[in-house]
Image (tube, grey):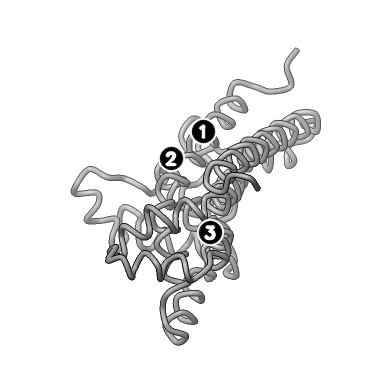
């Protein structure tokens, strides 16, 4: 007999959906933030870095509450989104938003480090040849920083997959709608006689995380060989 109930399997599937959506939502913003952190002046860089790091240092419950105030159906932004038919509060899309916000700092950092490691002469040579900033970014910066981008993607995915505090505060834990894998683990640990189910859910979470790391390593190495042959 399987230790995982249909609700548990649904929670795993929903977590994968939420994590993938979160990564897709935040990827362009993470790339933009990482690039800006390597280009802006010191004062602006400090302010931007503080903003990027904020979800990492705030209590997740506080972040979830702020999201509820802003994007709930009666929130400052959510009320306008609701008129357009976009519902985030207590909906799986809200779980994706919460996961994206919480995983954003971990996604930006390896991308930024990879971009900072690129020799300045590379960009300067392209600038001398008249290449505009967007061309230099997509043809030089992004390919050369690809291993860091891959690392950021897997870190963001893993964090989004394991996000609990902000998610449960913002969207709750409704089976089939917002009950994610971390929430299912929490409720299993709080129910007498559900230790086996909790362990099975933890094993599923670990297996998914390991698979994501392996895929990221394979993709990162393949891209690195293609961009920098001979290394």
Query: In which image quadrant can residue 142 be found?
Result: bottom left
Disc ID at residue 55: none
Looking at marks 2 and 3 on the same chain, the residue that comes earlier in the sequence is marked by 2
- Residue at image mark 3: 111
- The foreground one among 127 and 114 is 127
Q: Residue at x 38, y 49 (%)?
A: 89
| CA distance for labels 2 and 3 | 27 Å
View extreme (left): residue: 83
| CA distance for labels 3 and 1 | 27 Å
- The foreground one among 90 and 101 is 101
Q: Are marks 1 and 2 in contact (CB under 8 Å)?
A: yes
Where is 183 relative to 76, above or below?
A: above
Where is 60 relative to 27, above or below?
A: below
Query: How many numbered marks have been drawn onto this rendered protein structure?
Result: 3
Left or right relative to 36: residue 197: right
View extreme (top): residue: 1
Element assignment for label 3: helix
Q: Nearer the viewer, mark 2 or mark 3?
A: 3
- Residue at image mark 2: 92
Q: Residue at x 36, y 47 (%)?
A: 88
Looking at marks 3 and 1 on the same chain, the residue that comes earlier in the sequence is marked by 1
Q: Residues within 10 Å of mark 2 (few under 14, many from 20)?
A: many
- Residue at image mark 1: 14
- The foreground one among 63 and 150 is 150
Q: Residue at x 49, y 69 (%)?
A: 52
Q: Quadrant of the N terminus?
A: top right
Left or right relative to 110: residue 30: left
Where is 48 relative to 102, above or below?
A: below
Q: Nearer the viewer, mark 3 or mark 1?
A: 3
- The foreground one among 96 and 197 is 96
Left or right relative to 161: residue 52: left
| CA distance for labels 1 and 2 | 8 Å
């Amino acid at each position: 007999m399987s230790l995982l109930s249909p609700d548990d399997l649904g929670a795993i599937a929903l977590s994968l959906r939420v994590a993938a959506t979160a990564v897709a939502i935040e990827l362009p913003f993470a790339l933009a933030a990482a690039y800006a952190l390597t280009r802006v002046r010191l004062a602006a860089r400090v302010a931007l870095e503080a903003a990027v790091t904020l979800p990492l240092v705030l209590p997740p419950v506080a972040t979830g509450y702020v999201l509820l105030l802003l994007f709930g159906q009666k929130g400052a932004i959510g009320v306008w989104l609701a008129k357009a038919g976009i519902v985030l509060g207590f909906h799986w899309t809200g779980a994706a938003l919460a996961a994206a916000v919480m995983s954003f700092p971990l996604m930006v950092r390896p991308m930024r480090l990879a971009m900072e490691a690129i020799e300045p002469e590379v960009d300067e040579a392209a600038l001398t040849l008249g290449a505009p900033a967007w061309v230099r970014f997509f043809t030089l910066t992004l390919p050369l920083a690809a291993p860091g981008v891959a690392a950021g993607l897997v870190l963001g995915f893993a964090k989004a997959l394991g996000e609990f505090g902000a998610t449960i505060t913002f969207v709750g834990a409704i089976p089939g709608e917002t009950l994610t894998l971390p929430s299912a683990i929490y409720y299993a640990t709080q129910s007498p006689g559900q230790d086996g189910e909790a362990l099975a859910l933890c094993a599923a979470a670990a297996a998914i995380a390991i698979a994501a790391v392996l895929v990221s390593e394979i993709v990162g190495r393949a891209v690195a060989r293609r961009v920098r042959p001979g290394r």
